[in-house]
Image (spheres, grey):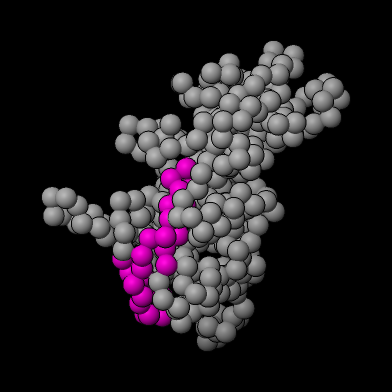
Amino acid sequence: MDQAREPAFVQDDGEVLDSYSQTVMRVAAAVTPHVAAIEMTARRRNGRMRMGAGSAVLFTQDGYLLTNSHVVAGTERGHAVFADGSRMELELVGSDPLSDLAVVHGRRPKVPPAEFGAAETLRVGQLVVAVGNPLGLAGSVTAGVVSGLGRAIPVWSGNNRRVIEDVIQTDAALNPGNSGGALADTHSRIVGINTAVAGAGLGLAVPINATTRRIISALLSDGRVRRAYLGLVSTPIRLNPSTVIRTGQREGLRIVEVLPGSPADRAGLAAGDILLTAGGRPVSNAESLQRLLFADAIGQPLDLAVLRDGAENHVVAVPDEMTSNGS
């Protein structure tokens, strides 16, 4: 009787990994050192401590880290712990609830800063890697794809409602503690700051783009961002061929919701309208509108071209300043 044959091959640790695994491992190794677990505290009037915990991304050599506004809300100081075990004390520099971004600062760290990418280059289906500290598990890595772009999500601050626009949707698994962590592309560049878990298989991240870079600069210089406020929720939409021919635009912003009493409401805008231009400039995504809504737009008439029932109309809105109470 013939002896049983040995298997044709035996897989061992030297087996070449598939390209997907190699990419995720390479990005994880490059990004993890830049991501810290943070814990922030402040003493309340009743003597109790207010605590916030999450993740943060080191983005300068002199110790500035980017995180979520909701992670540091109501706090002043705290500490960060990096993947190599190094620790540094933190103080809050500034926070912008509208974008859910905040900057904290500590002493010059031992680790180098992360490299920012450009979320404008992302495409639906593109591989992304999330690094954070969910449920206290430091340096956790998940991977997925970009599921959607240009999303808008409403958030609440007390009794006031705000809208975070142009967020990245990904199916990379996110859990409590991931907030403030990094969303990286396959070149290990930070393209987003993970901000929320909206449901099973649905993660959201604030994009790193021209608008958020401006927000970060304002937080670094002034500790806050003066924002003009229209009060509408929108989503990108492709225009039909006849509208493309008539306007020369291929895309616009479909208004999903107008917040009651807002400048957009006072101007007569309504859900279902398609915003074509603002201040004479075409708008095709939330960022193209947001970049017009900084301090210099507050109180100034803003001409809006709107498509309603197939007809183009012009209305004038006067943006308010976004205040801490959400108005």
Q: Quadrant of residue 22?
A: bottom right
Residue placed at 53% from the left, 68% from the top? 59
Q: Is residue 162 visible?
A: yes
In the image, residue 61 sits, relative to residue 78, either above or below, namely: below
Q: Position of residue 139 (x, y in %)?
A: 42, 70
In this picture, residue 30 sits left or right of residue 19: left
Q: Which residues are magenta?
A: 78-105
In the image, residue 157 sits, relative to residue 188, either above or below, namely: above
Q: Between residues 154 and 64, which one lies in front from this camera angle?
A: 64
In this picture, residue 50 sits left or right of residue 259: left
Query: Furthest residue to the right?
Result: 245
Q: Position of residue 122 (x, y in %)?
A: 66, 52
User: Split into 4 quadrants, where in the image is the C terminus?
Assistant: top left
Q: Quadrant of residue 235?
A: top right
As for residue 86 lying within the magenta part, the answer is: yes
Q: Between residues 123 and 227, which one lies in front from this camera angle?
A: 227
Residue placed at 58% from the left, 16% from the top? 268
In the image, residue 190 sits, relative to residue 270, either above or below, namely: below
Residue placed at 75% from the left, 27% from the top? 239
Q: Between residues 133 and 41, which one lies in front from this camera angle?
A: 41
In this picture, residue 228 sits left or right of residue 71: right
Q: Position of residue 289 (x, y in %)?
A: 64, 37
As for residue 165 lying within the magenta part, the answer is: no
Q: Is residue 192 visible?
A: no
Residue placed at 53% from the left, 83% from the top? 13
How many labels were placed on the picture? 0
Q: Position of residue 26 (x, y in %)?
A: 58, 74
Main secondary structure of the magenta stretch: strand
